[in-house]
Image (cartoon, rainbow, N blue to C red):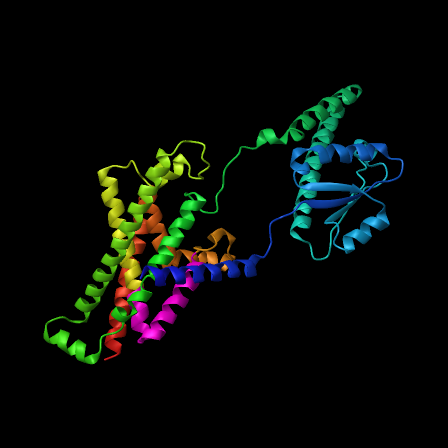
Amino acid sequence: MFAGAIALLFLAGAIALLAGRALYGDTAMGRVLVGVVLPKEDGLARQMVSMISSLDSVNSVCDFQYLEREESLEKLQNGELNAVMDMPKGLIQGIIDGSNPTVRILLPEDAWLESRIFRELTEAGAQILGASQAGIYAGNELYLQKDLGARLPELERDLNQIFLSYSLPREDYFRHLRVSATGDVEVPVFYGISAYVLFLLLLSIPLSGYLLPFSPVMQRKLALAGVGSISRIFGRYVSLGSLFLVMTTMAGALMKGGFWLLEKLPKGLGFPISEFFIKKEIGVEDGILSGMLALLILVLVCLGAAALAVVIFQAAGSLLGGIMLLFLVVTAQHFLAGGFLPTIFLPEVIRYLAPGMPSAILMAGVQMALTKAWSLAVTAKLLLMLLVCFLLTVWLERKER
């Protein structure tokens, strides 16, 4: 049983890896390469660009190259640059006197991710500059109305200092918030849960002979013994779910023993398992009540996996058809549920469908059992999944008569 399920698990993982590459490829953002065209003999403009490029928020993503106009356009067309900044003559003086000459930002026709990010940066910078100038103009108008025109230079100097003190140390306005695509659990825990659910669903394949629909003769024999269709289906759910629970208990005992050994090892050996992962995520030090609730949730998870396998084999009607249908349904819906790639990386349409996938429901149940973050909604989804599979199995069995 273990050998067959593990082989299929590796095959499903290969399918997920290839599907992820086909969907996204190498979409990680690289550094933004920007060509800067400066007017000749305009040292102030070069100083301004140097100051902007030294800011952490810009320097962390952008690399600036000072080029001639023709060279920059050629590199932009050849894909060697993500954007070009064409600086007008007298830019600094224009900002001071209010004429505000336009800085031309050139982007490729098929804007890449880096080009779009640079466009957002420039638009944000323009909005900051516009807000600052609006404040200075408003102050100037107020002083002129109050006959304080002689103090305008002092006002502009003070406002410039205020606005620069707001815009330059922008890191002071941000707080670091860790955002994880895997939700409330660490990445290793998320993929551990995903692998467990996938293994549980594929573990039904070695038991294919047991899950085949009953022959007409067997159905009549069981009916004479007082065992109807509902009792037969319930018996399969309980027996297969009990087997899954035994496998889960064995795997949990091995994992807990492994964590215990890792805790006993001397520190500094380089094992990438943190104290948070061992104690808080896995629940080594939880009470009896929470442990009983976690066991109950795992029972529902095992019954849910068994129910899905039974209804698939009942729909297939044959050994080979059941194996193929189970493998295809399990791997496809596991991918759509975010088991291979977290749902945040999936297309928007799939993100709406993901919460209703069986794997998503089972993974949420396992996560709740591990983190002890109890949720009636997750429990209701597990019970609803059991009910839907049970009704479908009963309908399919009676339809075959």
- Residue numbers of the magenta segment: 309-337
Residue 98: horizontal and vertical position, in percent?
A: 79, 34
Please name the residue shown 23% across and 44% down the image.
292
Quadrant that contains the C terminus: bottom left
Could you tell whether 187 is left or right of 316 in the image?
Answer: right
Please name the residue shown 39% across and 35% down the image.
275
Of the pair 322 and 156, the residue shown nearer to us: 322
Residue 299: horizontal and vertical position, in percent?
A: 25, 53
Q: Main secondary structure of the magenta part?
A: helix
Question: Is 332 in the magenta?
Answer: yes
Could you tell whether 315 is left or right of 43 in the image?
Answer: left
Answer above or below: position of 38 versus 136.
Answer: below
Residue 15: horizontal and vertical position, in percent?
A: 48, 62
Please name the residue shown 50% across and 36% down the image.
177
Please name the residue shown 22% across and 78% down the image.
215
Of the pair 323 and 61, the residue shown nearer to us: 323
Question: Is residue 336 visible to the viewer in this orientation of the structure?
Answer: no
Q: Picture quarter containing residue 129? A: top right
